[in-house]
Amino acid sequence: MAAVLRCLLLALAVLVVRNAAALPHHGPAKHDYRDALTKSILFFEGQRSGRLPPSQRVSWRRSSGLSDGSSVKVDLTGGYYDAGDNVKFGFPLAFSSTMLAWSVLEFGGMMKGELQHARDAVRWGSDYLLKATAHPDTVYVQVGDAGKDHACWERPEDMDTPRTVYKVDPSTPGSDVAAETAAALAAASLVFRKSDPAYSSRLVARAKRVFEFADKHRGVYSAKLSSYVCPYYCSYSGYQDELLWGAAWLHRATKSPVYLSYIKLNGQLLGADEQDNTFGWDNKHAGARILLSKSFLVQKVGALQEYKAHADSFICSMVPGTPTDQTTYTRGGLLFKLSDSNMQYVTSSSFLLLTYAKYLVSAKKTVSCGGVAVTPQRLRAIARRQVDYLLGSNPMGMSYMVGYGAKYPKKLHHRASSLPSVAAHPGKIGCSQGFTGLYSGAANPNVHVGAVVGGPNQNDQFPDQRSDYEHSEPATYINAPLVGALAYLAHSSGQL
């Protein structure tokens, strides 16, 4: 389980490279970004829960979790397993859905034949979030007892651990997970605005209702649900960032002055100017700043001018060789935040760099980082280097995307991938019996094409061990922002 624990920050001893000239190039390796894009989207089909459709392309998976929600008489089938286990964690699921939608919104026009597959991936998530928010003032935020699930190594098709349902409501508030869910619904409504207006309207109406609940009943969901959601997906950063993020998405989806007023009135209280430079499933401040900066840069909403400065501050923290650089890089040139699932920060940061570069080009602007003028082209170069590292331009010559390139991880920390498929082994594989798959030295029998693992350690080393979940586990929130980044890189390289 890719749990991100803040205390790791204090324990990390990393090799730091701050000089841009010192960040190495590993040859001009021209990657096939189009192939990587196709595979990054395909990955989501391998993470599906629920009844699989006839169009399912990942053939080693079967339908699963078909009674999810029955214990509380709510249909909670569908959605995604977040990573290598069989729990549906609503917080990262919603963030992954938001980022998939944002990828399509910014770079969908470059995806060509992959656009429909990307939309399908968004819809699989938003369909589930509609079910999870079917009851007013309630969001069902988790299906599955994580402790009991992790005590077994089972295929999702076999799982017999309790599918316990957890929710937030007025007596058990969860502004963080609820506002993230509202953001995901609002973002998805924009994806389907032209292709399915009725569905889009339904999504945005639900987003409004869920955001109102999140704002009215404030609290961190892991306060009262701690024993069920922690240490896996505790809300370490609080709920303020999600309220700002949710409002930003509703502002973009509705253009309603209500949300602009909310942002102007509450922005500072919700941490708009906090100097955090980590963007992921827990902390959304940086993403909200970039998103709101578009309103000023592109749509000329003067009331949001301060978000250009907030966005600049975040972006400048990632530009090597400038006085404002605060980012740690490995010797091999990889952005390094945490030892646990570090690649999620690589993909999310790369996406924000490319998205902000797009906004800057549209507005004919640059960024001043401590007096150093930084162009959109430079931001794109930084992002490309990170994606290139992920795809194999690194000291190990290892692609961290399964199925891409000649050398990639073979022993994913992933139950379904590591055990024989139902087609290959129709009989049930029990809770304890499956651990032979976890500890086997053989490669996973099912190649989870497109899965991006947590990545190498701070020394650019990757042992490819199945039990090493920090580095060998894939997750939906690693892939979701990468989809947009790969679409841009494929298009800009003439591959799409």
Image (spheres, rainbow, N blue to C red):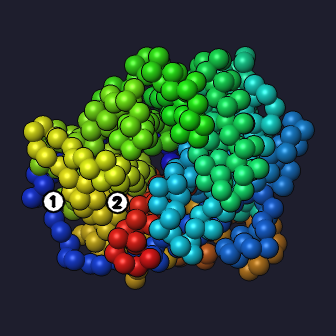
Image point (23%, 59%), residue name: 377
Tell me if residue 86 comes above or below residue 32 in the rendering: above
378 and 181: which is toward the camera: 378
Q: Which residue is mark 2?
A: 456
Residue matched to label 1: 23
The picture places residue 248, in percent across and down from the top left corner, at: 51, 34
Left-right relation of 333 to 484: left
Q: For this rendering, which residue is in front, 196 or 157? A: 196
SS class, disc 2: loop
Name the residue at 47% across, 60% down.
Answer: 107
Q: Amino acid at mark 2?
A: Pro
Task: Pick whichever, 74 or 84, lies toward us.
Answer: 74
> Crowding at label 2, few (<14), some or many (≥20) Cα neighbours within 10 Å?
many
Q: Is residue 110 visible?
A: yes
Residue drawn 50% across the image and 42% down it = 281
Percent across and percent down for residue 374 are: 17, 49
Q: Nearer the viewer, residue 157 or 235?
A: 235
Alpha carbon distance from label 1 to label 2: 17 Å
Q: Which of marks 2 and 1 precedes in the sequence?
A: 1
Q: Could you tell me residue 336's position as x and y percent?
A: 29, 50
Whole-percent x, y for residue 278 in the image: 36, 39
